[in-house]
Image (cartoon, rainbow, N blue to C red):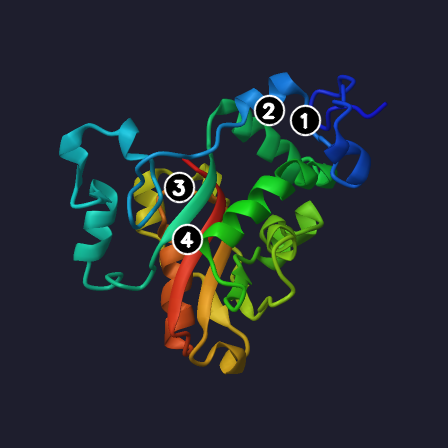
Amino acid sequence: MDNCLYCHQPLRHSSSWHHFFSPNHRVQLCHMCKEKLLKISGELCQKCGRPLSALSPQYYQSGLCSDCQKWEQDAVYKGTLGQNRSLYLYNSFCKDVMAQFKFRGDYALLHLFQSDWVTLYKQVYSPAYLLVPIPLSDERLYERGFNQSLALAELLSSNIYEGLTRIHHEKQSKKSRGERLEMKSVFNVRDGSRLKSKDVVLIDDIYTTGMTLHAAAIVLKQAGANSVQSFTLARS
C-alpha cells in the first residue's frame, strides 16, 4: 500500500476504471493533506495572479491590485513582467511542504505538485514558450544540492534556458519586504542567443513581492527576450 508523501499515512485508492487503466497516475497525498493545499481560484489580479477576494475594494482597481499598480507606475519596472500565475496559496501547510522540499532535500515531494502544476500551465501558457528557471547562486546550490525552480520547470517542458545566472546573495526569506524591493539586480545572462525574440516564462517556487521576478525580467528583456511572464508554485 502507498503512503502519503507528506504525512506518511496509508493511502486508500478508489477502485475506479481510471485507476485500473492508469497505474502510473497515483494519488500522492492523503485526503486530509490535500484539503490543506489550496488552489488559487476566482477573480485574480490580471498581473500577479493574487486572488482579489482576499483584498478590500480600495486595494485593487481596473483588475490590478495596489502592488501591481505600483509596479506599473515605476519607470524602471513598468512593462517588464507580464502576467504571473500561481498554483497554490502560500498558507502555513504549503509553507511547511515547500520548506521540506527545498531546505530538507525531500525531492520526492515534487510529485505532490506535478499533476496540478502541469495542468494549470497547459491552461495558461503556450508550449512554444521558453522556460527560464530562477537560478540559485553557486553557494546556495551547493547547500541544497538542487535548484527547485529547475526541477519545477523540468516537469513542464524540455524547452528550458539555463543561461540566467545569479550572484551570491542573502536568502530572500531573511529579508523584509522593504529590503527586497531595494535589492539591486543580482542576475546575469551567460549567453543570450537563445533569448532573441523569444516569449519567456520565468519559473519560480514562490511569488512574494515580485522583486525577484521583475529583476530577472529586466535582464532577460535587455538580452533580447520579446516578452517575459512568470509561473510560480505558490503566491503569498
Q: What's the distance in space between the residues labelled 4 and 3, CA to CA?
A: 9 Å
| Nearer-N-terminus badge (4/1) | 1
Q: Is residue 65 left or right of residue 119?
A: left
Q: Quadrant of the N terminus?
A: top right
Q: Does residue 126 sit above or below 173 in this rendering?
A: below
Specify whether residue 158 is in view: yes
Q: What's the distance in space between the residues labelled 3 and 2, CA to CA?
A: 23 Å
Do the residues under discs 4 and 3 have CB atoms within 8 angstroms? Answer: yes
Do the residues under discs 4 and 1 have CB atoms within 8 angstroms? Answer: no
**Mark 2 nearby-residue class (10 Å; few <14, some 14–19, many ≥20):** some
Q: Does residue 213 sit above or below 19 in this rendering?
A: below
Residue 34 badge: 2
**Mark closer to the observer (4, 1):** 1
Name the amino acid type tagged 2: Lys
Q: Does residue 213 sit above or below 27 in this rendering?
A: below
In the picture of the structure, the residue carrying the numbered disc 4 is: 212
In the picture of the structure, the residue carrying the numbered disc 1 is: 29
Name the amino acid type tagged 1: Leu
Do the residues under discs 1 and 2 have CB atoms within 8 angstroms? Answer: yes
Q: Position of residue 69 (x, y in %)?
A: 19, 49
Q: Position of residue 112 (x, y in %)?
A: 66, 35
Front one among 21 and 45: 21
Q: What's the distance in space between the residues labelled 1 and 3, CA to CA?
A: 25 Å
Q: What's the distance in space between the residues labelled 1 and 2, CA to CA?
A: 6 Å
**Mark 4 nearby-residue class (10 Å; few <14, some 14–19, many ≥20):** many
